[in-house]
Image (cartoon, grey):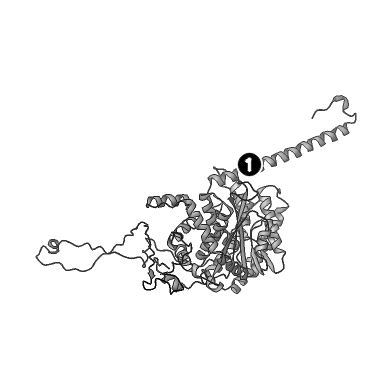
Amino acid sequence: MSLELDSLPDDTSKLKEIIVSLAARHSEKEQHYQFQIDRLHEQIRLLRSKLFGRKTEKYVEADQDQLRLFDEIEEAGSGHVNEQEVPVAAHRRKKRGRKPLPENLPRIEIVHDLPEEEKVCACGCRLTKIGEEVSEKLDYIPAKLQVVRHIRYKYACKGCEGIDSDGGAVKIAPPAVQIIPKGMATAGLLAQILVSKFCDALPFYRQEKIFVRLGIDIPRATMANWAIHVAQRCRPLMEILRSEILSGPLVNIDETTVQVLKEPGRENTAKSYMWIFRGGSPDNPALVYQYHPTRSGEVPKNYLDGYQGYIQTDGYSGYDALGCQKGIIHVGCWAHVRRKFFDVVQARQKNSRQKSKTGSGDVALSYIKRLYAIESIAEQGEYSAEQIEKIRKAQARPILDEFKGWLEKRFVQTPPKGLLGKAIAYALHQWPRLIIYLQDGRLRPDNNLAENAIRPFVVGRKNWLFSGHPRGAEASACLYSLIETAKANGLEPYLYFRFLFDHLPTAANEDEFKSLLPQYLDRRQYLQAPLGAVH
């Protein structure tokens, strides 16, 4: 800024005030620009770390030489974290070496023996067998296709030629009941195709090429139509799964994006969402995926209509309305809090010649690490819910109180638009929900159960990229629900789908449908069902 000499006042004190004011304004602008530059550099470092750095969120202490776990962490102007001893349960070292092959696999014995002329000693005596040495090798038998021929005999009366019969001249055995009437796919083929896509993330177009190598042509469009048809037949199971979820003490909720083509009134590039609800009995959980074109909070609100109990989610504002409903207690997620402070550590500028200094992000992560150390001890000890609640209130509550005090102190000292400021603000905003897990031992500190359940969908989405129609997205939601529920209840997905597709066509009422869910399946009947069974 320039000043005309004629405009300068005669009073020198007035001139000094103008110069001081201009200097202060210039300094404020410099600070503002410097903060903007630092914030942009921070974002660049974070993006570089996500692109080229370690993908794991496992936190590594900054000072490895001192082997500090929960020791005092020095930080200018922030005090220190008090050292507290956390007992760690004893463990046994795992034995190294190859794991034995499963006993249930069939075994073919190949005997290697000496020739008869070598079974004679140099002294002339015949050698005596004193033992044997056995080594097991694992063999693989490639998949093969077979044709199942259904032969239906016809009968006719040669005496009256059907004149005296009310049922017609010809009688024939009824056709086999199948999940796709008049279709060529058996329960085994359908199970293989659907598990390959919705469990192993193998798109239909890749399976089409695999079948061509096996000598059969099954177009991808045919496989997609089969998936939609099977999902429609499984709809009664989805209603029962919803009832299971609404009956449990806790519902974990999460959502992720999905691209769906041919949605009415929307562009093909528009984002849609796949929601996941996990609930029911803690020992026999139910998982339901739901496709919706929107991320509105009305989706979980409508699905959980009439529910009473805990819900656990991340900090997305669309879930806020759920916590306001009578009878619902909203639990927060410590994993998301930890992730934001981990980003702070990842974005911190590091000097390759010097050791990285400990910062506020490390302090926060150390607090959270102490909380999870308590959870690890409780999990390894196999305590009851009441015992876990007492352990948390005795050991985790003091850590949480200290952590909150540190957050409130750092909140007034930290720029709000930086990564650290946003992480602190997020933790304080979510704090009432983050500490609810203390009051019930059945709760977990994070929403990882829902995130782990939705991860198979995310992995599959990287391969098949989009759903070609809303009907396909709805079918995917149904089939993912059944597969993930089966996995959560300890069932092998292919065997479960084969058993389900064999018995689903004959189910006629709610009790029979319910008996086909993984939670209520007759395990003896399930395990004894032959793989080649045809009904």
Residue 522 horizontal side relative to residue 13, left or right: left
**For residue 248, above or below residue 66:** below
Q: Amino acid at mark 1?
A: His
Q: Secondary structure at mark 1?
A: helix
Residue 337 in the image, given as x and y percentages of width and height: 63, 56
Residue at 18% over, 61% down? 114
Quadrant housing residue 185: bottom left
- Which residue lies under the disc numbered 1? 41
The answer to which of 8 and 106 lies nearer the viewer is 106
Please rate how many residues cluster around mark 1, counting C-alpha atoms within 10 Å: few if below 14, some from 14 to 19, many from 20: some
Residue at 66% over, 53% down? 423
Evaluate whether residue 300 shows in this view: yes
Residue at 68% over, 62% down? 301
Residue 261 in the image, given as x and y percentages of width and height: 58, 49
Residue 179 horizontal side relative to residue 385, left or right: left
Residue lying farthest left? 124
The answer to which of 42 and 527 lies nearer the viewer is 527
**For residue 309, above or below residue 144:** below
Evaluate whether residue 481 shows in this view: no
Residue 355 in the image, given as x and y percentages of width and height: 56, 47
The answer to which of 42 and 104 lies nearer the viewer is 104
Q: Quadrant of the C terminus?
A: bottom left
Residue 378 horizontal side relative to residue 176, left or right: right
Residue 426 in the image, given as x and y percentages of width and height: 68, 55
Q: Quadrant of the N terminus?
A: top right
